[in-house]
Amino acid sequence: MNHNFILTSESVTEGHPDKVCDQISDAILDACLAQDPLSRVACETLAKNNQIVIAGEITTKASFSPEGIVKKALKEIGYEYSPEILNILSQQSPDIAQGVDTGGAGDQGMMFGYATNETAELMPLPILLAHKLANRLKEARKSGELKYLLPDGKSQITIEYRDGKPFRIRSVVIAAQHQEEVKLEDLRQDIIKQVIDPILSAYDLNKDQIQYFINQTGKFVLGGPLADAGLTGRKIIVDTYGGLTPHGGGAFSGKDPSKVDRSGAYMARYLAKNIVAGGLADKCGIQIAYVIGYRQPVSLMLDFYGTGKIEEGKVADYILKNIDLSPGGIIEKLNLRQPIYKQTAAYGHFGKEGLPWESTDLKDDIKSLL
């Protein structure tokens, strides 16, 4: 289905209050998995002012200090303060555990995955660039290139598509937390030269008439949890595909892989990416749905958006016959009981090298369907 449209996607830096909470929740998850791979973790974090609340359910043999993890995460981000920490973690509900113990899903829900060949990473270009811009803000701050930058920040990019493909960049938005003394005009020029241009120069798109919106309010000194409340799982579109595709009802961070909100979404991405990498379609969206306590998915839907070289139903049949989509099967296939999750808690869960769901080791088998 080739058509014309305009798509905007956003990202946020690791110092954004919601991302602070995601990183704390996933750091606690990693600490549990590092000692006890069978840990069951559902950890939520709330941050506001000088207070951080850690809540949820954890069943683990691991020994760790939640307070120490919080302080380390804040320091790594760049926040130099010692918060008051309220720890209200408890064990997983036995009513939920009885369904997971038998290999069933930990909850009901639907998960989505997506891939497109419009970028080398097989990710939609708008969210990929938004992440690169936000990450570049971090690099310029931590390297000292722009010494006046502080940890909080946002990026947003709008791209015009023609015939279903990226045609030109229409606008770029950057909100960068900064020290009081920097002049706004200097900051805006530096951001274009040191942050935006190095990222966009690598892409062959029409850039002649880009609108720049940089610190549009004129001042961004107070940021992070001191300026706004943060909460785990509140940036779910940032975490996935930038609004180009549907999103399930669950967030990812702070959840161990027995939670299909996370592992199911990772498997959907893995399958979609291998389908596109294998040449079966230029674009692929996948939905998988589960019921609590039940091992196998109750539905699997594929959509090639009119770009397929084969019928979606044939590929779906192949997946159901050859891939174990139970929670345990996904965990084993993608080797998900590893402490690898904190790295996903900022700048997106998809399109990053080295993560198991980004592997294309299935593409040759899938390609045989052609």
Image: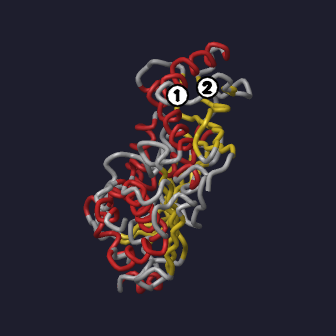
Q: 318 or 13, which lies in front?
A: 318
Element type where label 1 sits in the image: helix
Residue 191, quarter of picture? top right
- Above or below 182: residue 43: below
- Amino acid under label 1? Leu
Kindly report which numbered mark, 2 or 1, lies closer to the viewer in this rendering.
2
In percent of the image, x 51 and y 76: which residue is there?
289
Looking at this view, name the residue that lies furthest to the left. Answer: 35
The answer to whether residue 23 shows anywhere in this view is no
Find disc 1 in the rendering and name its residue.
200
What residue is disc 2 on?
207
**Element marked by disc 2:** loop
Place residue 32 in its image quadrant.
bottom left
Tell me: 134 left or right of 331: right
Q: Give the residue displayed 60% in from the left and 61% down from the top.
A: 246
Which residue is rendered at x = 46% and y = 33% of the image? 78
Q: Quadrant of the C terminus?
A: bottom left
Q: Which of the pair 251/57 is nearer the observer?
A: 251
Image location (x, y in percent) of residue 272: 44, 61
Residue 99 position within the rendered picture, expressed as x and y whole percent measured from the top left: 42, 85
Q: Amino acid at mark 2?
A: Lys
12 left or right of 87? right
Q: Which of the two labelled residues, at mark 2 and mark 1, occupies the earlier sequence position?
A: 1
In this figure, what is the number of numbered marks? 2
CB-based contact (under 8 Å), mark 2 and mark 1: yes
Location of residue 346 in the rendering, given as x and y in whole percent from the top left corner: 47, 45
The quadrant in which residue 109 appears is: bottom right
72 or 88, nearer to the observer = 72
